[in-house]
Image (spheres, rainbow, N blue to C red):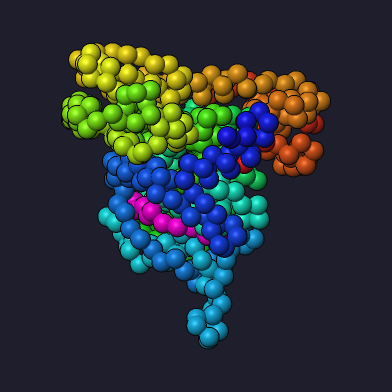
């Protein structure tokens, strides 16, 4: 039995991650072991996103895990922003190194050194690369998938001749992430720009996609950065234009991580466990054979053979339609299997027993509502994909409805504090753009500005903290 979400959401989250074999704690505090079921989800995320990234003319590469200290020091704001989280290698074997090596917290610095060698002329631009890699950041309050010392991610890096091209690329990556999170993960999210204090260290500006979890806290699902010419000037990355003039390049970087899996758990799960979107689930369908005699055992092999034969017909349909499935022939009772696969969040359960075989029927159960629907074999063949598509759409609709119902417009700071303390969610309010007000709000409420939404209409109001006239409307929330 899982701890109910309403009783302790954080405890429920940890229990789900551990009991569904997504991950477990590693011997090194703050690290995790991603188990096969959890890694299968990550592989599906990789497969889809890798295709989307390549559609945008980006090629995969791999850079070293270790970064010389002098590289990090070249961009002052960058090194200052990451300093508290960097893990350092000081010895090789028993010998002290002449220069410390940073264990990759991100790759802008080491890539900057390579770009200086690779780029000579406007003909070398744009340069678009991506790597799937592991990252190490020394987190003080680790949580499985959400914040760990080491995690997996994808980081895209592009180099352009003009500011406009770089800005367009940063927006392109942002839109790609928003579409992926909504279309594949079934999680509604809001795209926006980060404030100066919340942007990526060393960037001109940062975009992010923000989603609301079921405990009304926000989770940053992905970020995209317009790096400007900051790293170009630090590393001397220049190109000759068509007139023979030297110019500094413009850069972007963007990425998502295994944090997305934590988002899947918190955005969709219920008191029975995971609920996985069909497009991402390791198995989209589970087939449960139901033995006769009250489901306690097989009376004879002949009965079992009939069920096996009928199930093989169903398996062929699923294979032909490229639906990922598993048939559970384990010795446990059907009821035990129902609970186990509900816990693991499989979108569609198919039950096949003597009655289904005799009548050429299929019993279908979708994970989110657990309602049984008995249909003919012919109906099943024509509708099984539709079942999964409907399920996927329902998850996004539910997430969108939840988010929209938990966006609050406030007119006073006292109202702000009351809602953030007792309800949570996104609070839409005006902000004067002064980081002093931003910091005071965070200190008093633990809420941060998640983003300045890109789609809000231009309006005028008063800063929720100081009362000054403002044209900037933002979303505040407590976040992971």
What residue is rendered at 35% in x and 14% in y? 373
Q: Is the magenta stretch mostly helix, strand or loop?
A: strand
Quadrant of res 218: top right
Question: Is residue 431 shown above or below 153?
Answer: above
Q: Nearer the viewer, residue 460 or 18?
A: 18
**Residue 349 in sight here:** no
Query: Where are the magenta residues, as a range?
Result: 125-138
Q: Residue 6: x and y, percent?
A: 66, 28
What residue is rendered at 78% in x and 23% in y? 415
Is residue 132 found inside the magenta-colored segment of the image? yes
Quadrant of res 434: top right
Q: Quadrant of the N terminus?
A: top right
Is residue 186 found inside the magenta-colored segment of the image? no
**Residue 410 in sight here:** yes
Q: Quadrant of the C terminus?
A: top right
Quadrant of res 166: top left
What residue is rendered at 19% in x and 26% in y? 306
Q: Nearer the viewer, residue 443 or 75?
A: 443
Q: Residue 164: x and y, percent?
A: 42, 41
């Amino acid at each position: 039995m899982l701890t109910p979400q309403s009783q302790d959401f954080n405890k429920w989250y940890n229990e789900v991650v551990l009991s569904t074999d997504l991950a477990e704690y590693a011997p090194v505090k703050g690290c995790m072991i991603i188990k096969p079921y959890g890694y299968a989800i990550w592989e599906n995320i990789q497969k889809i996103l890798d295709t989307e990234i390549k559609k945008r003319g980006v090629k995969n590469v791999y850079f070293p895990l270790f970064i010389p200290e002098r590289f990090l020091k070249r961009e002052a704001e960058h090194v200052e922003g990451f300093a508290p989280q960097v893990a350092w290698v000081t010895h090789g074997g028993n010998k002290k190194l002449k220069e410390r090596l940073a264990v990759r917290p991100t790759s802008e610095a080491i890539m900057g050194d390579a770009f200086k060698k690779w780029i000579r002329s406007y003909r070398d631009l744009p340069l678009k690369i991506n790597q799937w890699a592991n990252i190490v950041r020394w987190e003080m309050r680790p949580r499985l998938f959400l914040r760990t010392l080491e995690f997996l991610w994808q980081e895209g890096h592009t180099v352009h001749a003009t500011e406009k091209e770089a800005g367009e690329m940063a927006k392109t990556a942002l839109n790609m992430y928003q579409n992926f999170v909504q279309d594949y993960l079934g999680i509604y999210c809001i795209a926006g720009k980060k404030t100066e204090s919340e942007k990526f260290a060393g960037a001109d500006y940062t975009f992010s996609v923000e989603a609301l979890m079921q405990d009304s806290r926000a989770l940053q699902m992905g970020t995209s950065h317009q790096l400007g010419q900051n790293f170009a000037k630090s590393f001397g990355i220049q190109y000759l234009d068509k007139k023979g003039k030297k110019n500094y390049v413009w850069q972007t970087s963007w990425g998502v991580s295994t944090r997305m899996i934590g988002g899947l758990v918190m955005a969709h799960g219920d008191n029975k466990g995971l609920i996985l979107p069909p497009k991402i689930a390791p198995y989209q369908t589970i087939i449960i054979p139901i033995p006769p005699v009250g489901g306690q055992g097989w009376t004879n092999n002949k009965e079992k053979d009939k069920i096996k034969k009928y199930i093989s017909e169903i398996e062929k349909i699923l294979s032909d339609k490229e639906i990922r499935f598993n048939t559970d022939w384990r010795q446990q009772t059907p009821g035990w299997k129902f609970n186990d696969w509900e816990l693991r969040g499989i979108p569609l359960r198919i039950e096949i027993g003597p009655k289904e075989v005799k009548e050429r029927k299929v019993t279908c159960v979708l994970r989110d509502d657990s309602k049984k629907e008995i249909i003919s074999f012919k109906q099943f063949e024509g509708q099984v994909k539709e079942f999964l598509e409907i399920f996927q759409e329902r998850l996004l609709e539910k997430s969108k409805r939840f988010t929209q119902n938990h966006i609050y417009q406030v007119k006073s700071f006292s109202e702000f504090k009351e809602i953030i303390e007792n309800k949570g969610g996104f609070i839409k309010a005006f902000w004067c753009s002064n980081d002093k007000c931003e910091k005071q709000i965070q200190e008093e409420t633990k809420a941060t500005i998640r983003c300045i939404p890109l789609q809000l209409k231009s309006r005028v109001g008063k800063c929720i903290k100081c009362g000054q006239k403002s044209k900037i409307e933002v979303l505040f929330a407590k976040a992971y």
